Amino acid sequence: MLRWLATAAIVALLALDLFLPSTSLGRRGTEAAARADIDGAVGAIGETLPDIALPDLEGDLVRLSDLRGHRVLLIFERSVDW
Amino acid sequence: MAYRVLCGLFGAALLAVGLLFFLQFFAYQEPGSEPAIPTGPVGHYFVAFTGCALVGWAGGLLGAARHPGAGRTVGTVTAFALVLSAVYRMVVWLIGDYHVFLGSLPRVEAALFLLLALAFVWLRPPHPGKEAA
């Protein structure tokens, strides 16, 4: 009996694994593609960026337009390196 | 016989990977070395621990290969560990950070582990009491 229960659970997981890409949850697996550069999403090189706003280290919101006239370097990184 | 072969082969594979992980920790300590496993000092700490655990697991499987009747429980816990390994790999496949690095490999591994778990469930020898009955 336990053997059949274990088999049912394993087969169910196997089915989930095989059909994962076609489920709504599985489509998140294409996150890598979503992260890839998308032409025109934030403007091309040489074009003006949209007026984005991001929190600084103190939590205050800084708008890109606040920095007009200054050179701005945006760096995206993960801060944890194990 | 099939259970003995399964335990023997899987045990030997785990032993090899376990020793590799254990030795990788020491290789990483060499100044200027390029880590084979792309992780840092904390990651290698856990890689070494994983290696030790795999060597212990392999010992149990190799023992079951020699004495399958006495090693029934090893098959059960191995199937359970394989299912757990498959479950987290399926979650890993959903997470973009891993997907960039590993692609669809975690899903393939999950399927392989689940099939192996099925083999351990069905090839495990019957309980000695039931066999006699």
Image (cartoon, coloured by chain):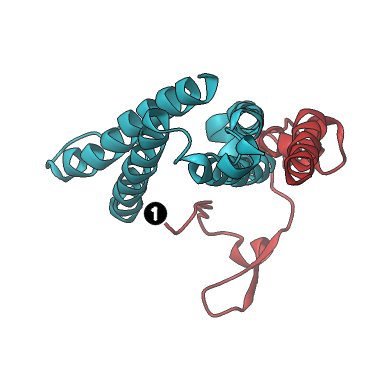
Chain colours: A red, B cyan
| Quadrant hosting residue A13 | top right
A29 relative position to B82: left or right: right
For image coordinates 87% across by 41% down, the residue present is A24
Frontmost residue, A35 versus B117: B117
For image coordinates 86% across by 37% down, the residue present is A23
Pick out the residue farthest to the left. B31
Frontmost residue, B60 versus A43: B60
Residue B98 spot, x, y in % from top left: 57, 40
Three-letter residue code for mark 1: Asp
Q: Quadrant of the C terminus of chain B?
A: top right
B10 relative position to A42: left or right: left
For image coordinates 59% across by 41% down, the residue present is B127
Residue B56 spot, x, y in % from top left: 33, 45
In this rendering, the answer to whether B85 lies above or below A82 is above
Which chain hosts label 1? Answer: A
In this rendering, the answer to whether A64 lies above or below B81 is below
Instruction: For mark 1, give the secondary structure.
Output: loop
In this rendering, the answer to whether B98 lies above or below B11 is below
| Quadrant hosting residue B95 | top right
A62 relative position to B4: left or right: right
Frontmost residue, B105 versus B80: B80
For image coordinates 46% across by 29% down, the residue present is B7
Residue B26 spot, x, y in % from top left: 17, 43
Q: Is residue B93 visible?
A: yes
Frontmost residue, B37 versus A19: A19
Pick out the residue farthest to the front. B133
Which residue position is annotated with label 1?
A81
In this rendering, the answer to whether B33 lies above or below A48 is above
Circle 1 Cα neighbour tier, 10 Å, few/some/many (<14 / 14–19 / ≥20) = few
Residue B19 spot, x, y in % from top left: 26, 35
Q: Is residue B85 visible?
A: no
